[in-house]
Amino acid sequence: MIDRDGFAALAEQTLEHFFLTPPADTEQYGIGVTSGTSRSKVLVAMREYPVAQGIFSSGPGRMLSTRGSLSTALNNAVFTKFRSRHFNARILTLDRADYAADIMPLLSDFAPDGITGYPHIMSQLADYMDAGTRDGVRSAEYVGEGLTASLNENLRRSFPRAKVSMAYMASEIGGIGRSCEFLPENQYHPLSGVTVEVLEPDDTGEGEVLVSKTIAFGIMVRQYRLADIGRIKPGTCRCGKPVTFEIVGRLGRDYVRLAGATFRRDLFDRIATANAELFEDYRIEAFLENDRGISRGKLIMKVYKKGGVGDASIRKINERFLTGLYVTPTQTLGTLVKKGLFSPLEIVVVEQPFPDETKEAKIVQRI
Amino acid sequence: MNDAQSAVQDLVDAVRTSDASAFYRDMWGGAETFSDIPAVSRAEFIATPLSRRRYKDESGLVKVVRYPEGVFLSEWSFDDIQKEQWGEQARRPMVYLSNSYEAVEKSMWCRENNMIPLIGEKMAEASVFTASKYRIDALITDSRSLEKMLPFFTASTEPISSITVIGDSFNYEQLAPYSRFARRIRLLLILPETGAFADAPYSSAPVFSPLGDSLVEHQDGVLVLTKRRLLTTPIIQYRTDIATHPVGDPSGGFTLVNR
Ligand SMILES: [Zn+2]
């Protein structure tokens, strides 16, 4: 099993191999770069594109893509080139700076029949496409993050005629899985040559996802910990693929595991939506606190509503989450508080709306 | 018509009789010879949707081109990208440009010419780090991004083989300190909608020479450009806002005039 540090060593190996024996034909190789965070350094690795796998033999002719990093934008262009062996393929990878009113007629002129990219950015981009342009989109491939129920609903409204598929990848190792026409959102079949396992699954089958695949030049990454949480679905898919896995969240983001409980963002979202009259938005911090030698889980929930949240509302919010939030298959948060495994939920009212950039990380695990 | 103009007459004929688009034909009126056709400008590109300026149906990239006066789409086929003269052959080139469309397109140029490019991200620190990890031996960049690479160069023991600085204007003094970091620094005149059309080795007073695929003319103090190849959106008598001064040598050299 290897973590990010272990992967860094393999990344070096791929570079060394490339420096010593550069391939004569470069077409099937590229460079994978991860965006570094404050805690981890940027990683650079050579990578091999799955050109031979036939996944580029079909697809839209005019693709509109959102842009993540520039390396992913370049990958989009490379994939378009691979598609161009089979049919005429064009791509427009729209820069964030061009999300402006004057882009609407240009997108209508480009008339994309396919879209790809991060679903939450795509739902923002939809605001810059007129109804006719959105109706012309026949295929949507979402990548880079899971599709929450509300996002899925929004996107289906924005692109009513698009057949939805999803791809699962990591910037440092490339493609991992793809959905098929029979799979629901967030479920994938491993790409050929890729093995997906789940580490220490809990009683619902969920656990950390481990990925094994060849990166480049025969150098393999084995049981790489991606910090995603998923489960293996039993049975053979109707398409004939024997292995299906589901991604349920990102460790410490959509999904926090703490003191034997699992906090899933979509469950919080569901209760929040049902109680929209009490509060408009929320953020959760989850952590272990030490109470005279006994460690207990603790949640601090910050809530915001224009005009404030009164004491009566705070009591209601508290009650709805204690009784409505299931944190194991059979137990609510309230049950675990009664058992002493968790401290009572602490609700803090904030006076300013939450900054936009924290929208994708509503649940954060603090160490 | 001089020889250079006659050479582009085939292009003019192809465009004039094209079934794919009437963009140029409508603008030219009845004019049939290169010397008679009027210049086109960015304003016409802005006013005409890409779908009505497209002269061929080939796979490629579509870019958003944004100027203060307006925004339009520019489409480049992979074949045309391959033939552009954007950089120099290298083993490990890096493309580091502030415009994302240009960065992806120039990276595809590397790939189409059998190179594996490293593409620099917005964050300077990360780009400096990845450049040293990849041991880059060539850099395609713009003046702004080149400055961000200074920590890479000061930490390098050896100069890289080439730096290509692209743009439609250059600050020669600002580039001076970089001449010791590469064996060659090449200044490449380029517009997103036209591709490259002239270059010069770096010096304190560079004289630019038109590239082989470009017919460069100077009218009323500005550069008027024709690209000899039939591009997806052809460039014929394209009036730029680049102020030039021809030096009068036989190769068509010119200098840039600061305005
Ligand atoms: Zn299937």
Image: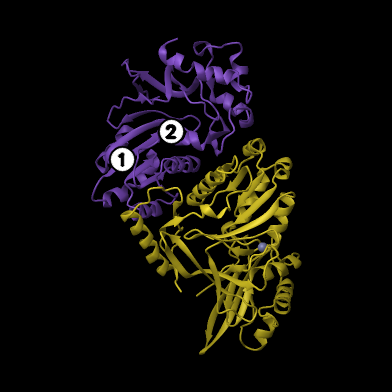
Q: Which chain is depicted purple?
A: B
The chain ID associated with circle 1 is B
Mark in the foreground, 2 or 1: 2
The chain ID associated with circle 2 is B
Residue at the spot of label 2: B84
Q: Residues within 10 Å of mark 1 (few under 14, many from 20)?
A: many
| Image quadrant assignment for residue A44 | bottom left
Please state the horizontal and vertical placement of residue A185, each as a whole percent of the image: 67, 62
| Image quadrant assignment for residue A275 | bottom right
Mark 2 sits near ligand 1, with its Cβ under 8 Å away: no
Instruction: Judge from the rendering whether residue B248 lies leftward or rightward of residue A278; answer left or right.
Output: left
Colour of the chain lettered A: yellow
User: What kind of element bears circle 2?
Assistant: loop
| Image quadrant assignment for residue A326 | bottom right
Please state the horizontal and vertical placement of residue A13, each as a whole percent of the image: 36, 62
Labelled disc at residue B162: 1
Pick the front one: B232 or A25: A25
Pick the front one: A176 or A326: A176
Residue B220 seen by the camera: no
Q: CA distance from mark 2 to mark 1?
A: 17 Å
Please state the horizontal and vertical placement of residue A206, each as a whole percent of the image: 61, 75
The kind of residue on which mark 1 rests is Ser
User: What kind of element bears circle 1?
Assistant: strand
Image quarter for ligand 1 equals bottom right
